[in-house]
Amino acid sequence: MKAFIFDLNGTLINDMHYHSRAWQYLLNNELGGNFSYEEVKKNMYGKNQEVLVRMFGPNHFTDEEMDKLSLEKEKRYQKEYLPDLRLLPGLNVFLEKAHQAGILMAIASAAIPFNIDFVLDNLKIRHYFSAIVSANDVTTSKPHPETFIKAAELLHTNPVDCMVFEDVPKGAEAANYAGMNAIILTTTHTEDEFSYLPNIKRFCNDFEDSFIKNLIP
C-alpha cells in the first residue's frame, strides 16, 4: 500500500458512543423527538445536516437552523468526550512507523472541521496527515465514494493503492465504490453488518492487531 486513508470517529478514536449520546440528547431534549439510542446509532452517518433530515424529514429545518444545531451537538460531544480522548491502542506506534516508512496518510471523514481539529490538535497528530477531507469538502457524503476519491487525489495516489480504515458499513461501502480495500475497526459495529461488502480485508479491535502491524514493511 502506498497510502492509508482513515475515517476519524470510531476509527482513530473510540468515541461513537459519545456522539450517539450527544445526538440523542439534542434530538429528544432540544427538538422534541422520542428516539431510542439504537435508532440514533443506526442513523448516525454522513453529514450532521443529513442526520437531521433523516430523523425529522426534509424541510423541517432551514439550512441556518441545521448549522446551528450541528454546532450545538458537537460542542456537547466535545465537552463530554475530552476527558476520555485518546487514540485506539497501538495507533500512536502505527502512525509513526507509517510516517517513517514514507506511507502517505489522509483523514477522510464526514465530520466537520471543528471536530477534526478537536481530535488532531488535542492529540498532536496533525503532522502525520498530508491531506484532510471533511464534510465541508464534499458534495455527497458516504456511502458515496467522493470523500475517499478526493483523499486519494490530494495524496496523488491511485485508489487501488490506498487502504481505508473504517468502523461503519456505510463508510466501508464508500471505500468499495471508490475501488479501495478496507480494514474495519470493530468499535461500533459487528462483523455480520459488513457481510454484503467484498472489500473487507480484516476486522480488528485496534491497531495492535498483527495484520495491521504487517502492513508496514
Image (spheres, rainbow, N blue to C red):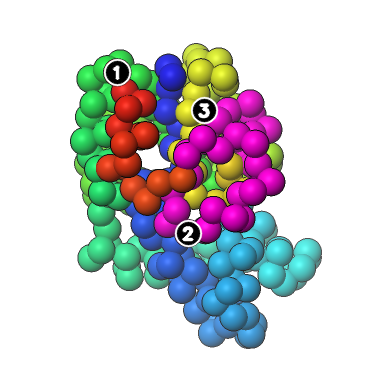
Question: Label 2 neighbourhood size at 10 Å, few (<14), some (14-19), many (20+)?
Answer: some
**The C terminus appears in which quarter of the rendering?**
top left
Vertical placement of 95 versus 71: above or below? above
Q: Nearer the viewer, residue 209 or 40?
A: 209
Q: Which residue is mark 1?
A: 217
As shown in the figure, which amino acid type bears the numbered disc 2? Thr
Q: Is residue 171 left or right of residue 186?
A: right
Q: Residue at x 27, y 23 (%)?
A: 99
- Front in this rendered view, residue 112 or 40: 40
Which label sits on residue 46? none
Q: For the residues marked 3 and 1, what is the alpha-carbon distance in whole angstroms?
A: 23 Å
Q: Which residues are magenta?
A: 173-202
Q: Is residue 138 magenta?
A: no
Q: Earlier in the sequence, mark 2 or mark 3?
A: 3
Given this view, does label 2 or label 1 mark the residue nearer the observer?
1
C-alpha span from label 2 to label 1: 29 Å
Where the N terminus falls, by quadrant? top left
**Viewer-nearest residue: 181 or 102:** 181
Is residue 16 something that shows in the picture? yes
Q: Is residue 12 left or right of residue 155?
A: left
Q: Position of residue 187 (x, y in %)?
A: 42, 57
Tell me which amino acid carries mark 3: Ala
Q: Secondary structure at mark 1?
A: loop
> Which residue position holds label 2?
188
Q: Nearer the viewer, mark 2 or mark 3?
A: 2
Tell me what residue is drawn at x 55 percent, y 77 percent: 37
Q: Is residue 141 visible?
A: no
From the image, tell me which residue sits under label 3: 151
- Mark 2 or mark 1: which comes first in sequence? 2
Relative horizontal placement of residue 130, taking residue 153 as reference (left or right): left
The answer to whether residue 179 is magenta is yes
Q: Is residue 217 above or below residue 67?
A: above
